Amino acid sequence: TLIAQAQSQSAAPAAPQEYELGGITISGVQYLDQDILKTYTGLTVGQKITIPGEDVAKAIQALWKQGLFADIQVNAEKIIGTTIFLDFHLSERPRLASFSFKGVSKGDAEDLSKKVPLIKGKVLTDNLIINSIDEIRDFYDEKGFTAATVNVVQKKDSSLRNSVSLSFIIS
């Protein structure tokens, strides 16, 4: 039974019911520690929770705040009497496999590599991309090129699971 899914709207909510939390599992992750993720939810085995209710919503919010996931779903794996077992199915954001700068000199590309906050293997967030674009624009503003534009192209990288390559196209 799907209890909650981030980024979607559900039909009319079921009547709230109190359960004892019998267990928490984490599924869908490849690189992250499941025990730490369970801790992030703020839920503990034996805790009384209401479903639907704020406990699961707060757990989802706490996981979202980590900035590591593209999707979060919470399912009731099983219900025995008034004991519920929850599974948090998490879809990790992709990781950065590589990045490049197009339309610039080799020297500028080397300077940008040092200035832009990109690290191979790091979780790729929208904020990281925006900060990188801002750094590139600042770099060219300081050189007197105030009309520089930056476009970003993301491509899945087949060399690593769940990874992407970024190309910054600068003109």
Image (tube, helix red, strand yellow):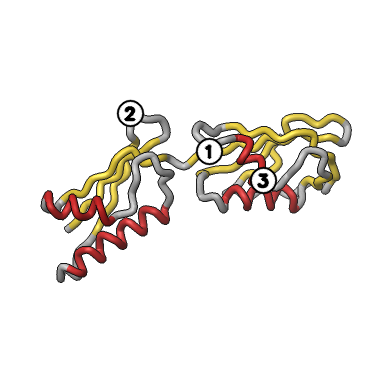
Q: Amino acid at mark 1?
A: Ser
- Give the residue at mark 2: 159
Evaluate if marks 1 and 2 touch, with contact meaning CB atoms under 8 Å apart. Answer: no
Evaluate if marks 2 and 3 touch, with contact meaning CB atoms under 8 Å apart. Answer: no
Q: Earlier in the sequence, mark 2 or mark 3?
A: 3
Q: Amino acid at mark 2?
A: Ser
In the rendered image, residue 129, in percent from the top left (x then y), is placed at 36, 53
In the displayed structure, 83 sits above or below 136; it is above
- Give the residue at mark 3: 41
- Give the residue at mark 1: 91
Q: Quadrant of residue 95?
A: top left
Q: Residue at x 42, y 53 (%)?
A: 126
Q: Quadrant of residue 164?
A: top left
Label 3: how many Cα within 10 Å (few below 14, some 14–19, many 20+)? many
Give the number of callouts: 3
Measure the alpha-carbon separation of dots 1 and 2.
Answer: 19 Å
In the displayed structure, 142 sits above or below 30; it is below
